[in-house]
Amino acid sequence: MTLPKALAALVLLLIAAAPFMPIGGTRQYVLHVLVQIFIWSFIAGAWSLMGRFGLVSLGHGAFLGVGAYTATLLWNAFGLTPWLGSIGAVTGAMAVALVVGYPCYLLRVVGHYFALVTLAVGEVVRLLIIAGRTWTGGSLGLTLRPAPPGASLVAVQFADRRVFYYAAIVVWLGGLYLWRRLDRSMARSALEAIGEDETAAASMGIDVTKFKLGVTALSAGLTALGGVLYAQYITYVSPETLSGIGVSLRIVFAAVLGGMYTLLGPTVGTALTIALSEYLRVTFGIRLIGMAETIYGLALILFIIFLPAGLYGGISARVRRRAAAGRPAFPRPSTQESVE
Amino acid sequence: MMDPVFLAEAALNGLLLAGVLALLALGLNLIFGVLDIVWIAYVDLVTVCMYAVYFLVTAYGWPLWMAGLGAVGVGVALGVAVHLLIISPILGSPPVNQLLATGGLLFFIQSFLTFLWTTDHRAIRLNLPIIQIGGVFVPFARLLAFSIALIAMSGLYLFLTRTYMGTAIRAVSQDREAMRLMGADPQRVYVVTSAAGGAMAGVAAALLIIQYPVHPYFGAAFGPLTFMICVLGGLGNMVGAFVASFILSEIISFGGVAISTEMGYVVAFMVFIVLMFARPGGLLTRRE
């Protein structure tokens, strides 16, 4: 066993043992924060599947919302178990992704334009949730129907937090696995080429639309799954916590802060932002309303200004060096300029 | 069948909302469209300026026009501060970082305003006349906002196309590096444009506070729509933004009357998405 592998095994063991550690009365709270970190890390990782190839989406709240509300409504209205409901949720989110993504990619909607289209999609979903208040409860949100006695497995509602803790870890590991699979596949090279220059990639015979659609559907489906898991855990859904710009921006923040080009970047970023906002929330409590979020916003600005230069910039430079090493070795005419 | 006066009122309300949106889009279009920098918190800067007008009028008893000028001053200061403190250090990073840094600013402004003045809605009570044209009621405040938006748009257009500084701003938007090679100072252009964008936020604030009560989340209500108008009109295209705000606000107004307020917005956003597919470069794109 090599050193990094041993280290990873040790960390996983620590994570698995966390619920049984003697940390006293704060255990429930610590577990609660950890569950949130794992769920949102999984979602941020799903976002980074697209983000790292230049597909900056500001509308991932749409997929979260579609996912969480599909599963919740199916359970509340028809009593369909979320095990099956999540299939509907993922399918629904993928359908939205394809309906919006296909014309976007076919017609080359990129950059600012793509970001704004996704933003609009997020707003459409949020407003539809509010407008359908007969079923969704509008802005007030919706509480999941409690599980009938003895049917907590069918309802996917557990009183014991540890169940969700391990479920979140399994899902999170699954997300990392998929991230790694994509990272080592041919699709990654194709998508990187597309991210750098679409026209050039197309001329190399890469089916630009197909690859982009594939990664978008994957990202949307995983995000919806994360939404379902979060809804099951909190047993409450509302348009503000599961769709809309605030949530979408928080996902992007986490992914970019941690570094969206690395496997664990989104996890690190999510842990950082959630820990920070929890710390501020606990510190200020109900005194000085607004102060916690004020400091949070300020910290985000400072992180983006000072941290990416080290973390994000350093990583992207390494990626670029690796890409350069892979190129055929003929001298480039511009080498003299770069020596300064 | 709906009453024609009812429909005319909806159409007119849409037109007047268009004035508000166009006003908001002006300054953003200068920074986002022309300079290609994403200030996602732009409408929140307008919110801060609205608070400035509100307190100058209610607490210090300034006349409205003077408070408006004060708000323009606040806007200029904010614009320059945002550029120097947030944008300037990360000008070379990918656009997503600018978006996120100003996204942090958005969280900051919204919660700091909540902290200072709670989430109360604050309005300036003015006894402005309501003009009646053929059975349709037109609030004077909205008419004023609409006309000033039109004037400001023409002024901005002339500034960009007819003055030396305007030409320099457009040059920076085309190539940030080449400016330096020409011996010009891009930093000055950025600061001047940010100041102008901030001034526009002040103008918008002075005209909005007499129509809408201000609260910390005012920016959240208008922010996305303002961005969409800039993009739909074609980035940096002032006339296009005006057309775009007209289209979207008429849809919102008629949709609101026919179905519900939320569905009006839903239809408007969907039309935006479809129009982005149909005309990806904006409504009034010129072939180059």
Image: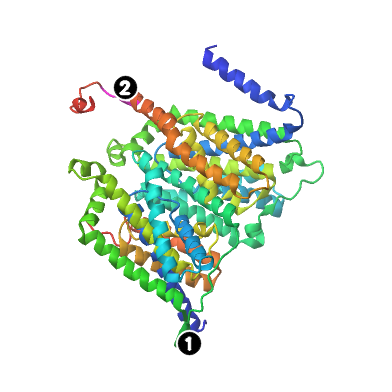
The residue sitting at the front extreme is B60
Where is the N terminus of chain A found, in terms of image quarters? top right
- Is the stretch drawn in magenta largely helix, strand or loop? helix
Is B83 above or below relative to B13? above
Q: In the drawing, does residue A138 fall left or right of residue B164?
A: right
Subunit bearing disc 1: B
Circle 2 sits in a helix, a strand or a loop, which is it? helix
Asked if A185 appears above or below B147 in the picture, the reply is above
Left or right: residue A223 compared with residue B151: right
* Residue A158 is one of the magenta-drawn residues: no
Measured from the top left, where is residue B4 in percent x and y?
Answer: 48, 84
Q: How many numbered discs? A: 2
User: To which quarter of the image does residue A271 belong?
Assistant: top right
Mark 2 residue type: Ala
> Quick one: A287 or A45, which is closer to the camera?
A287
Q: Nearer the viewer, residue B138 or B89?
A: B89
Q: Are marks 2 and 1 on the same chain?
A: no
The residue that label 1 is drawn on is B135
Q: Which mark is residue A179?
A: none
- Looking at the rendered image, the quarter that the C terminus of chain A falls into is top left
Which label number is shown at residue A325?
2
Q: Which residues are magenta?
A: A323-328
Amino acid type of the residue that numbered disc 1 sits on in the rendered structure: Gly
Q: Nearer the viewer, residue A336 or A160?
A: A336
Residue at the spot 66% in from the left edge and 55% down from the top edge: A141
